[in-house]
């Protein structure tokens, strides 16, 4: 029987990547007696579950919640498979959909929690919050006259989000003002900026991709257009694409971001349990930067969709990859909705492979040029990514597994050794055999 419109998911963090993909019917050629024996054994095990469930309901010291028992049993079954298979309840499923769409009804502010209150990190340009005069550093104390104190950050964010064209009142404490400021804001569609860009020294385009959601490819194209308008062609040295600490995202966005810099060839393939489920995704003609030099930055926090991009550009010798080894999350999860109000199943269904046939599962992408950052002593423990290979129950690698990779990015770009290396190579003030890459040594097209 064919399953209907499951979703395929990539990402090291919960709720990272998904894209629509219909699976093929599966044919089983097993003898009737073998099928009957397997079925009988399965039903004996299900009867065991039923017996335990009824005994817990009847004899546990306190009356349990039947729904929570079932949900815990389902989660236990999925968690026993690998670290990325799980059950999402209805709210978690909705949150994942919001994350991957990259847009929601809200106010347009980046916030954090400080001393039990919500602090504005920054308003997002051209959003209702920015137009209403919300400022960085503002402390939000009340939402619709209800105190924020006691709420978690997620609970406060949920209250600020809501249907477009609905109103919310914020009470704000602002530095330099004795009395609270009351602000009334009408919610609008907010698009998460997964791509940011800037010009370095009037000659290099810097592009930071923080996640792969539905807005990412459009954001990349806009960034390239803006950078090309700011840098005269005769001065342009090349581009840096920063994928460090990017946990992943939508498979189709990883493919289209890779395609933006490639003229031809395979980008990635996915291989499931059965050979007929193998899929290959290829680039279409049209390098958006017209062969200009390209450097990709990765580290131990670059996972899944980020690794697809880095691996494709590395295999095709289109970019030089700089930094530290990536996370090593090389599996694909399929999101299967379970009906109205029942959430969804996140199930590992395939591995993905780079154009040269590399599986990066529990290995990661090794950079062409390794650059280790100087890390403050107090941060050294917190800035080392153990990677996929350190996760309990992970899918085993083909061959030697790799664990541990630096994931620290210095807050001041002047201290960022990987970024400095990239700029120096593009300017020609530093030389390395890996830059520029040699297209003749690339994966055959």
Image (spheres, rainbow, N blue to C red):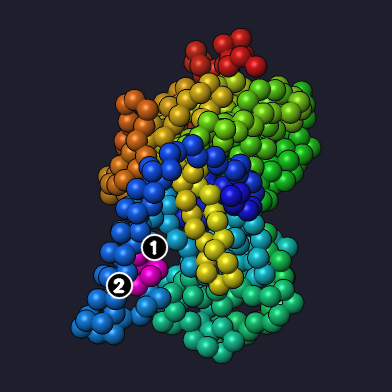
Secondary structure of the residue carrying tag 1 is helix
Q: Is residue 49 left or right of residue 323?
A: left
- Tell me the crowding category of disc 2: few under 14, some 14 to 19, or many 20 or more residues within 10 angstroms, Cα based: some
Whether 205 is drawn above or below 319: the answer is below
Query: Which quadrant does the C terminus fall into?
Result: top right
User: Which residue position holds label 2?
Assistant: 53
Residue receiving disc 1: 74
Q: Taking 328 as reference, is 98 left or right?
A: right
Identify whether 142 is placed above or below 265. Answer: below
167 sits left or right of 46 in the view: right
Percent of width and height locating residue 153: 46, 71
**Residue sitting nearer the eye, 265 or 48:** 48
Is residue 124 shown above or below 221? below
In the image, residue 410 above or below residue 42:
above
Which region is colored magenta? Answer: 69-74
Please state the total of marks drawn on the protein image: 2
């Amino acid at each position: 029987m064919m399953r209907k419109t499951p979703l395929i998911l990539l990402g090291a963090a919960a709720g990272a990547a998904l894209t629509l993909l219909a699976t093929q019917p599966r044919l089983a050629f097993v003898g009737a007696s073998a099928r009957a024996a397997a079925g009988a054994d399965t039903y004996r095990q299900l009867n065991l579950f039923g017996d335990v469930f009824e005994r817990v309901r009847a004899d546990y010291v306190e009356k349990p919640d039947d729904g929570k028992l079932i949900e815990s049993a389902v989660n236990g079954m999925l968690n026993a498979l690998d670290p990325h298979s799980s059950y999402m309840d209805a709210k978690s499923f909705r949150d994942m959909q919001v994350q991957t769409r990259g847009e929601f009804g809200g106010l347009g502010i980046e916030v954090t929690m400080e001393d039990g209150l919500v602090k504005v990190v920054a308003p997002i340009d051209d959003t209702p919050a920015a137009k209403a005069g919300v400022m960085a550093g503002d402390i939000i104390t009340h939402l619709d006259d209800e105190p924020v104190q006691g709420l978690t950050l997620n609970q406060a964010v949920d209250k600020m989000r809501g249907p477009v064209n609905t109103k919310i009142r914020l009470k704000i404490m602002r530095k330099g003002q004795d009395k609270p400021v009351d602000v009334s804001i009408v919610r609008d569609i907010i698009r998460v900026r997964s791509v940011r860009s800037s010009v370095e020294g009037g000659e290099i385009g810097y592009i930071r991709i923080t996640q792969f959601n539905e807005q990412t490819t459009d954001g990349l194209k806009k960034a390239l257009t803006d950078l090309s308008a700011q840098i005269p062609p005769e001065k342009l040295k090349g581009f840096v694409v920063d994928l460090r600490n990017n946990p992943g995202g939508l498979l189709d966005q990883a493919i289209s971001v890779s395609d933006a810099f490639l003229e031809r060839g395979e980008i990635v393939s996915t291989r499931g349990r059965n050979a007929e489920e193998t899929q290959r995704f290829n680039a279409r003609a049209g390098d958006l930067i017209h062969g200009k030099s390209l450097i990709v930055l990765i580290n131990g926090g670059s996972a899944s969709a980020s690794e697809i991009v880095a691996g494709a550009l590395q295999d095709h010798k289109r970019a030089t990859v700089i930094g530290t080894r990536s996370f090593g999350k090389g599996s694909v999860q399929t999101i299967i909705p379970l009906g109205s109000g029942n959430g969804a199943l996140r199930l590992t269904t395939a591995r993905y492979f780079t154009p040269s046939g590399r599986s990066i599962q529990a290995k990661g992408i090794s950079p062409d040029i390794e650059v280790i950052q100087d890390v403050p002593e107090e941060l050294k423990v917190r800035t080392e990514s153990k990677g996929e290979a350190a996760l309990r129950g992970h899918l085993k690698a083909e061959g030697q597994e790799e664990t541990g990779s630096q994931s620290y990015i210095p807050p001041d770009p002047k201290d960022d050794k990987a970024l400095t290396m990239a700029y120096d190579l593009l300017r020609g003030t530093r030389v390395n055999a890996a830059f520029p890459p040699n297209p003749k040594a690339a994966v055959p097209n």
